[in-house]
Every structure is written in C-alpha cells, then in structure tokens.
Image: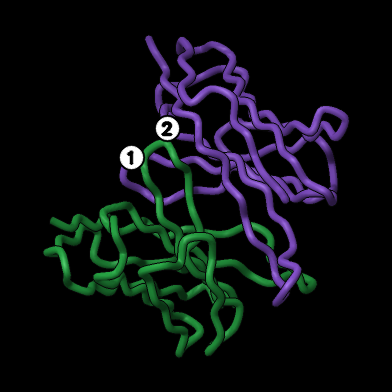
Chain colours: A green, B purple
Amino acid sequence: DGGITQSPKYLFRKEGQNVTLSCEQNLNHDAMYWYRQDPGQGLRLIYYSQIVNDFQKGDIAEGYSVSREKKESFPLTVTSAQKNPTAFYLCASSMRVAGEFYEQYFGPGTRLTVT
Amino acid sequence: AQSVTQLGSHVSVSEGALVLLRCNYSSSVPPYLFWYVQYPNQGLQLLLKYTSAATLVKGINGFEAEFKKSETSFHLTKPSAHMSDAAEYFCAVSYRILTGGGNKLTFGTGTQLKVEL
C-alpha cells in the first residue's frame, strides 16, 4: 500500500538533546512538508521541500533542521535550540499536477515529549 | 495574505442531526480549499477539495461543502451525524508561493465535533 510512514509514534527525550524524526513516502510525490501541531493552534509549517536537495523554511523554522537527500525521505531534526519542542509533528507530501501542488497527504504523526 | 477562519472551536450535535462546520477564507486570488479530518493521535485525512470546478463538492463519509465566493465561505455539512463523525476538522486554503514556486497550505485552528446520543 502506498502512503507516508512516520516513526516512532511516540518519542521521549531529555532537554538539550537533538532528536531526529523520520518521514518516508512511497507515493512518488515531489513535495514533502513538516508541520507542528499544538492544541488550539492548528498546524504550523516548519519546513518544506519541492525537489531533492532543496528545501525552504516555513513559518516556524527556528530550532529545526531538515535534509532531502532522497525523494522518498524528509527527516526532521529538532535541535536543542528549539525552546518548546514538545508537540505533535506531522509529515505530509504532495504531488505536482500541471505545475501546481494541491492537496497534501499526511502521515500518522510523531508525538515528541521533551522533559 | 491568505488566511482561514473557522467559527466555533467546539460544535456539539445530536446523532442524526445536521452537521454544519463553518469556514471563511481570505484570499487575493481564486483559492483552492480543503477540509481535513483528524481523529485523536492520528494524521489528517482529506475529506474533500475545491479546485475551481463545481462549487458544490462532495467528499467521503457523506460530507459536502459549498464554495460561495460572494461570502468567502466554504462551510462543511453532513445531513445526518453519526457517532463515528466525532473528530477534529480543519479547513485549509492553498496558495501559490511567490518566491521559489509551488503551493502552501494555510490551516484554520480546527473545530472539534462532538456527537451525542
């Protein structure tokens, strides 16, 4: 079955440690995205990538880093510089249709807790 | 700048009653609009989308939405609520990124739907 996988489902880390969240898709989609979800705030875009070896900052990129070495993979690193990293992180992907990216398809999410 | 407003962070309906979740958008160009549903501790699932074809859009699970340009609205409806519809619903607008190309989604803050017996 085609889809987006995120691992692990739950992740616990100590403050001051970097942590990398995995996102893999086998949909052959060109674009991939990372969002952060906090209660009552909807989804906020962290980073996005529309092509391999290229990515752009979203609205809340500070304290995060990404890479896009392969089309199917877009890992997110939450660094110790992120002031409030505890959140639900969602990865998404999107297919280019006639030059446009329309709907995004989401993975199941990773809940990160930092203490 | 594009934005989405969802009126009512919590909506409660009785099973079998009409579901109406409100979404208003702000966009300087013709928008592409979406409704997503999220069950607890899961990702978002696309319910339906408007991409400038028919203004009345039908989606999965019996949901539909109507694009009304004059009211800048894209409200989500379902004639008869079911217990399994209890979830959080997000409206989103897609817009073209001016630098670098491509599109981005801006999400509303979500509406939690509760279905009571």
Element under label 2? strand
In this orientation, which residue lies closer to the viewer: B92 or A82? A82
Q: CA distance from mark 1 to mark 2?
A: 7 Å
Write down the quadrant of residue B103 in the picture: bottom right
Q: Locate residue B47 relative to residue B113 in the image: left or right.
A: right
Q: Percent from the top left, x then y, of residue B93?
A: 67, 48
Position of residue A7 relative to residue B6, above or below, is below
Position of residue B7 relative to residue A16, above or below, is above
Q: Locate residue A19 relative to residue B117 in the image: left or right.
A: left
Number of residues whose C-alpha sits closer than 10 Å to that of mark 2, classed few (under 14), some (14–19) or many (20 or more): some
- The residue singled out by tag 2 in the image is B87
Q: Residue at x 50, y 30 (%)?
A: B111
Position of residue A14 relative to residue B10, above or below, is below
Q: Residue at x 77, y 73 (%)?
A: A99
- The residue singled out by tag 1 in the image is B40
Position of residue A79 relative to residue A113, above or below, is below
Tell me the kind of residue under disc 1. Answer: Pro
Letter of the chain that mark 1 sits on in the rendering: B
Q: Residue at x 30, y 52 (%)?
A: A87
